[in-house]
Amino acid sequence: MKKLYRRWVERVCTLVWLSVCLAALISSAATAQSARVEVAGSARAQEPQQSPPSTPPGSGAEQKSPDSSQSQDQAATPAGSQGPEKKISAQEAQELFRSVDEILKFVSKDTSLAIREDVKRKLVSRDEVVAFIRKHMDEDDDAQRLRRSELVLKKFGLLPRTFDLQTFLLALLREQVAGYYDPKTKSVNLLDWIEAEQQKPVLAHELTHALQDQAFDLEKYMKAGDADLGASKKEPTVADIENDEISTAHQAVVEGQAMVVLIDYELSPTGQSVTDSPQIVEALKAGMLVGTPDSVEFHNAPLYIKEALTFPYRYGLDFEAELLTKLGKEKAYAGVFKKPPRSTREIMEPSTYLSGERLPALPLADFKNDFKAYTKFDVGAVGEFDAAILIDQYAGVEVSKRLYPHWRGGYYYAVRPKGDPSAPLGLMYLSRWSSTQKAGEFAFVYAKGLKLRYQHLRDVDDDAKPAPPKNYTVETLTGKHSYLSEEGPVVIEVKGDMVLVSESLDQDTTEKIERAVFAEKGTP
């Protein structure tokens, strides 16, 4: 489900990260003074920063000289600032451009990825970047995909009903946009409103993307598994569901590697690195979810947005750090491109990637026949990351940390009633867990969340809930439970290690789905 708007994450992930990363690095360096840990550039900690984030590939531009990039247009004014932004001088830009080659050599040494060709460089304005993002958001296919994503997230309760995702992403981009590498033009794009010295760690991050691209073709790598299942005329297969998180996992590899290099670059004057500085890594990850004081849009974002936008950086960093420790540099960088992870579970739990874990496929409904009264709206995987955020939102982070590692698969299928495009979105959601007990625990959390998602909800099975067993330690839901909401019926059914949810679907359709998904193994 995170993939619902992964393409927007890729473009808008020109976000909070690098300023947050630098702030976290500086803060953790101060905390570690007693351990004689110092972070390069910590003297800059007292200077105001503009929130340059790290960015994924995908933004385009042609090479331009520093002098010609000093636009005569009115300067963009970021949120919280007074008057036009200060632009770096042509001399500072030239010095920043000269630093590219030096930093590229550091990146190559740190990753063992060879420099195969020069990297072009360009200075861009905030308005240029925002205009590029807006152009792509306005394209028909992308706009429709974003709209479907928004409605499904709202159906799951992960976005408020009145939330405007496109408007928010544009505002967030305007507030937080930063440098990026463009694989189309093979150029690293630097920012004319960020102090040159502050952009050098950005360069370390983005030049990692340049060497990844030279070695493995980032565009091709990031497009793996990026099929739009909701727009496809074909019904999804087992393979489609299993492949639906590949692009998300790949993005975590790309950004996780770049985060390691960023930290290694900042720590290089001390002779330290990610592998021997766990306190730095933990401070950095914590800082990502907090943001900087001027990150108004990010602070106000729903939990799912914050978690989704930071996922490739936080969990990607942990994933790469684990591979560096267990496998060494070659397999942690080039090796993981040759044998990439396929799911958010493998990123969140690197041991499952290292062991080559393969989860059994979930049974599929007979979509064509079971949903005869409906039109397909969207479909996709609900991965371990999505399950973790669902649990976090409705039961808290501690319950989520305890329960999400027991996830073993999930997908959703969203529909509209034929001939009634204004009707509430119908939803089927199937998940599998490590045991019947864990399935029951998740079902209870999901049922608890219904009361927060619907204004009017009535449990029609109050008398059917069995008493807890004697060894009861956590709340669970067993059997089949039905509810009525302002958007129609809701059914949650637990059988064996699976949980089936049906929302706003008629009884006949729900019963067909039950027979299809529970009949395969004769689940009791």
Image (cartoon, rainbow, N blue to C red):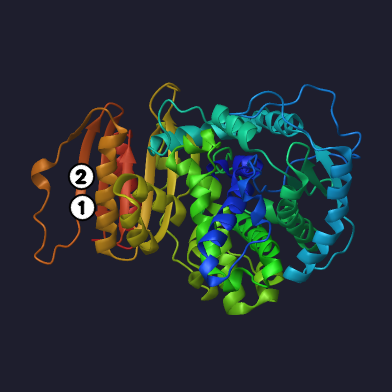
- Given residues 224 and 276, the one toward you in this image is 276
Pointers 1 and 2 in contact (CB under 8 A)? yes
Query: Gap in Å between the C-alphas at discs 1 and 2?
Result: 8 Å
Q: Is residue 397 above or below residue 193?
A: below
Picture coordinates of residue 102, whole percent (x, y): 84, 61
SS type, badge 2: strand
Name the residue rendered at 75%, 53% in the picture: 200
Which quarter of the rendering shows the C terminus? bottom left
Residue 401 visible to the viewer? yes
- Tell me which amino acid carries mark 2: His
Picture coordinates of residue 511, whole percent (x, y): 28, 43
Name the residue rendered at 65%, 39% in the picture: 50
Q: Quadrant of residue 327?
A: bottom right
- Given residues 431 and 72, the one toward you in this image is 72
Name the residue rendered at 33%, 34% in the picture: 505
Image side of residue 226 versus residue 373, left or right: right
- Tell me which amino acid carries mark 1: Leu
Image side of residue 62 versus residue 248, left or right: right
Read off the residue under disc 2: 481
Q: Quadrant of residue 476?
A: bottom left
Image side of residue 444 versus residue 253, left or right: left
Few, some or many residues within 10 Å of mark 1 (<14, 14–19, 20+): many
Q: Of tags 1 and 2, which is closer to the observer?
A: 1
Name the residue rendered at 26%, 34% in the picture: 489
Picture coordinates of residue 384, whole percent (x, y): 44, 56
- Given residues 380 and 470, the one toward you in this image is 470
Image side of residue 185 versus residue 373, left or right: right
Determine which of the numbered discs, if any, sits on residue 477 in the image.
1
SS type, badge 1: loop
